Image (cartoon, rainbow, N blue to C red):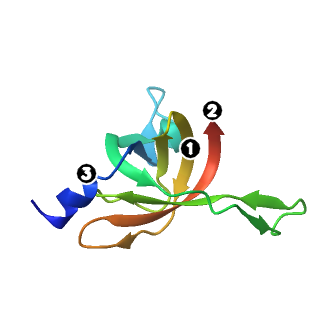
Amino acid sequence: MTEADILALTYQDSCWVYRPQKTTLPSGESVFQKGLDGRQVYENIPCALSSPSGGKLGKKEPTASIDTDFLLFVRPEVEPGDTVKVIRLGREYLTEAGLADRQPSHNNVPLKLAKAKA
C-alpha cells in the first residue's frame, strides 16, 4: 500500500470534476461550456474538503464581495478553472479550482466557493 493509498483512506467527502470545453451544436454553432455544463472528467471520487477560510473581502468591483476559500485534498489532477462539486457531510458545494500544489501522495487544490446548498 502506497502513501497515497493510506491517505485516501482518510477521505470522507466525494467530488465530481467538470472541465470547460468548446463544443459544436447540431446547428453548427460553436459554444463554450463551463461549470456543470462542461465535460465531466471525474465522478464520485474520494476527497477531503478543508474548513472554509471564513472569507476575504474582494474590492475589485464597485460592490464589495466576500470570497470563501477551501482546500481540496484529492488524488487525481484537477486543473485551474475546473468546476468541482463536493459533497461534504450531506451538503453540496459548487466551487472553482485554482492552481494545485502537487504532492507525491495527493494534490492540494485551492477552491473558491461559487454556491453552497444545504
Point out the frontmost of discs 1 and 3: 3
- Of residue 27 and residue 41, the one placed in the foreground of this image is 41
Report crowding for label 3: few under 14, some 14 to 19, many 20 or more residues within 10 A (C-alpha). few
Query: Which numbered circle lies on residue 9?
Result: 3
Q: Is residue 30 visible?
A: no
Q: CA distance from mark 3 to mark 2?
A: 26 Å
> Mark 2 or mark 3, which is nearer the start of the sequence?
3
**Residue behind mark 2:** 118
Percent x, y of residue 113: 62, 52
Left or right of 24 on screen, residue 107: left
Residue under the point 51% across and 36% down: 29
In the picture, measured across the screen, residue 94 lies left or right of residue 63, that is left
Q: In the picture, residue 40 is in which quadrant?
A: top left
Sequence-earlier tag: 1 or 3: 3
The residue pinned by badge 1 equals 94
Tell me the SS state at disc 2. Answer: loop
Amino acid under label 3? Leu
Secondary element under disc 1, as helix, strand or loop, is strand
**Looking at the picture, which amino acid does disc 1 mark?**
Leu
Q: CA distance from mark 1 to mark 3?
A: 23 Å
Query: Residue 22's x, y, as percent?
Result: 45, 46
- Residue at 24% in and 72% down: 104
Amino acid bearing label 2: Ala
- Quadrant for residue 7, please give it: bottom left
Q: Is residue 61 above or below residue 96?
A: below
- Asked if labels 3 and 1 touch by Cβ distance under 8 angstroms, the answer is no
The residue most toward the right is 62
Estimate the x, y position of residue 42 in percent, counting from the top left: 32, 43
**How many discs mark residues in the rendered view?**
3
Residue 43 in percent (x, y) is at 33, 38
Q: Residue at x 47, y 62 (%)?
A: 80
